[in-house]
Amino acid sequence: MADLETNLLKFKGYYFRNERFNINLLENTDDFEVRDDDVFLVTYPKSGTIWCQQILSLIYFEEHRKRTEHLETADRVPYFEYMFEKLDFDESPSPRLFTTHLPYYLVPRGLKNKKAKIIYVYRNPKDVMCSYFYFVNMLPIFKAADTIEEFMKQFLEGKVMGSLWFDHIRGWYEHRSHFNIQFMAYEEMKKDLRSSVLKLCKFLGKDLSGEAVDDVVRQATFESMKDDPLANYENVLNTRVGVTRREGHFLRKGTIGDWKNHMTVEQNERFDKIFQEQMKDFPLQFLWDI
Ligand code: A3P
């Protein structure tokens, strides 16, 4: 079985990608000065991160909506803990938009000022797992898992970047009262993108015109993002992530229930059993299929 751990670094109980993560920043997150108008997009990997990066960027930057400026989405909503670019966050103009996969206990303490906003995007974990399986096979740095079975073991043991899915979502949800946080379900965004964009605008206090909301929605669909070099991460993968790449795309399928095409009945039952044990009494609902 491929050993994912060799590509991972456990730091403060959480698995990071072994290189490029900003250890100085993470050792001193409590010193990181959070501004009241900062926004943190928080996700477990493969839950719709780049999708929500794109939506946030379109909501915040008129130049992005109008396509008059050509900065990649990845740069408009940069990762907090990974250094794909040399960025000095202290110098970045407000409002700063960040992306992170961090668990609740590793984010800067200043986020508890309850003014800075957090958006937590979650997705049903069977689709997360299948999406992740393709991801590790696309980027050999994560050591490919040959089969879903092999990857499912790693995923359910939390031996992946992001650690255990159950801990990530539970941790954030159970500590929600410490933060100014809005939970968003991938599946809700998929079913009704416009309503999701409006919900986000409301949470963010952004009063966009109907036309601007239309622009956001139009440019945040799977199809338009797949064709948009500023949004589809092809550039980032090819030139910046610094790893060899096999066949595959970040924007792979973008559907609900793809796990049904990959998991056997037995795997599904095993997954369900663990899900029920781990998520007992958890109030958020998951949409597994449509
Ligand atoms: P699939 O692999 O199931 O297609 P992340 O950005 O967190 O790594 O998540 C990637 C997943 O989000 C991929 O799922 C990708 O296709 C999906 N995704 C990205 N943009 C999307 C969009 N506009 N609509 C629906 N799904 C999207």
Image (cartoon, helix red, strand yellow):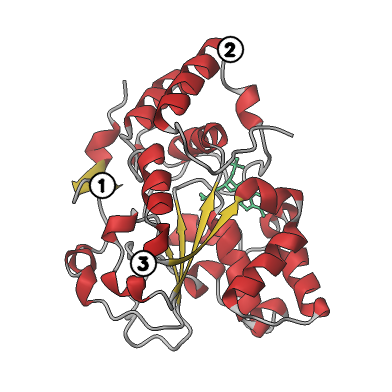
Q: Where does label 3 land, which residue?
A: 80
Label 3 sits on a secondary structure element that is loop
Q: Which quarter of the image is occupied by the N terminus?
A: top left
Q: Where does label 2 land, which residue?
A: 265
Q: Residue at x 48, y 60 (%)?
A: 236
Q: Is residue 240 above or below residue 149?
A: below
Rendering coords of residue 142 (x, y %): 35, 39
Q: Amino acid at mark 2?
A: Val
User: What mark, if any, has residue 245 been given in the picture?
Assistant: none
Label 2 sits on a secondary structure element that is helix
Q: In the visual, does 139 lie left or right of 264?
A: left
Please indicate, yes or no, whether residue 51 appears anywhere in the rendered image.
Answer: yes
Q: Is residue 88 above or below residue 146?
A: below
Rendering coords of residue 224 (x, y %): 74, 59
Q: Nearer the viewer, residue 24 or 277?
A: 277
Q: Nearer the viewer, residue 201 or 56?
A: 201
Asked whether mark 1 and ligand 1 are closer than 8 Å, the reply comes as no
Label 1 sits on a secondary structure element that is strand
Q: Where does label 1 land, which residue?
A: 14
Q: Amino acid at mark 1?
A: Tyr
